[in-house]
Image (cartoon, helix red, strand yellow):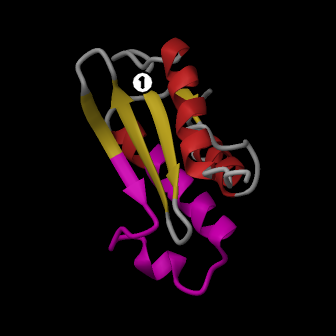
């Protein structure tokens, strides 16, 4: 019998291959995306220091009023804008985008567009 593919396991393997080449520094940190079935999360990470500089998600209480009643893609766009605003406060303008092994479409793409529209460059 054939085993059913575990899509999350495949995604993690892709992410590991991507992370071999992709790294964030203090000057150009990494914007990491995690997408669950209900929420989307974004973190800006300095891999050299091993620290998360800022983070935003669709579960943040500050974004709850903006996100209420929106589709998942609209929520992802709002989260992208929020992470970009937090990054600007921290003095970050340029980043490396890490899609986390996900295909660059749908919510991942909307998060990136939201971050770009709020001023992040990648």
Secondary structure under tag 1 reads loop
Instruction: Kindly identify the residue that appears in the image at 59 percent across and 61 percent down.
Output: 76
Asked if the stretch drawn in magenta spans residue 7, the answer is no
Which quadrant would residue 61 be assigned to in this image? bottom left
Q: Where's residue 121, x and y in %? A: 60, 29
- Residue 95 appears in view: no
Residue at the limit of the structure toward the bottom, as seen here = 69
Is residue 7 toward the left or the right of residue 2 in the image? left
Residue tagged by mark 1? 29
Q: Residue 82: where, in percent of width, then height?
A: 46, 55
> Residue sitting at 39 percent across and 36 percent down?
44
Residue placed most toward the observer, 29 or 104: 104
Residue situated in front as seen by the camera: 38 or 28: 38
Evaluate whether residue 96 shows in this view: yes
* Residue neighbourhood size for the residue with mark 1, other residues' Cα within 10 Å, grouped as few (<14), some (14–19), many (≥20): many
Specify whether residue 72 is painted magenta.
yes
Task: Specify the segment rendered in magenta.
Answer: 55-84
Which residue does the image show at 56% across and 68% down from the upper left?
Answer: 37
Vertical position of residue 36 compared to residue 3: above or below:
below
Q: Which image quarter is the C terminus in?
A: top right
Residue positioned 68% across, 55% down in the render: 4
């Amino acid at each position: 019998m054939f085993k059913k593919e575990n899509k999350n396991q495949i995604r993690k393997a892709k992410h590991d291959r991507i992370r071999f080449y992709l790294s964030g520094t203090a000057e150009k940190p990494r914007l990491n995306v995690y997408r669950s079935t209900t929420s989307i999360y974004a973190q800006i990470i300095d891999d050299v220091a091993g620290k998360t500089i800022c983070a935003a998600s669709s579960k943040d209480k500050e974004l709850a009023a903006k996100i209420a009643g929106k589709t998942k893609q609209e929520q992802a766009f709002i989260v992208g804008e929020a992470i970009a605003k937090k990054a600007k406060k921290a003095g970050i303008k340029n980043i490396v985008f890490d899609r986390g092994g996900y295909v660059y479409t749908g919510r991942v793409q909307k998060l990136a567009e939201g971050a770009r529209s709020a001023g992040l460059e990648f």
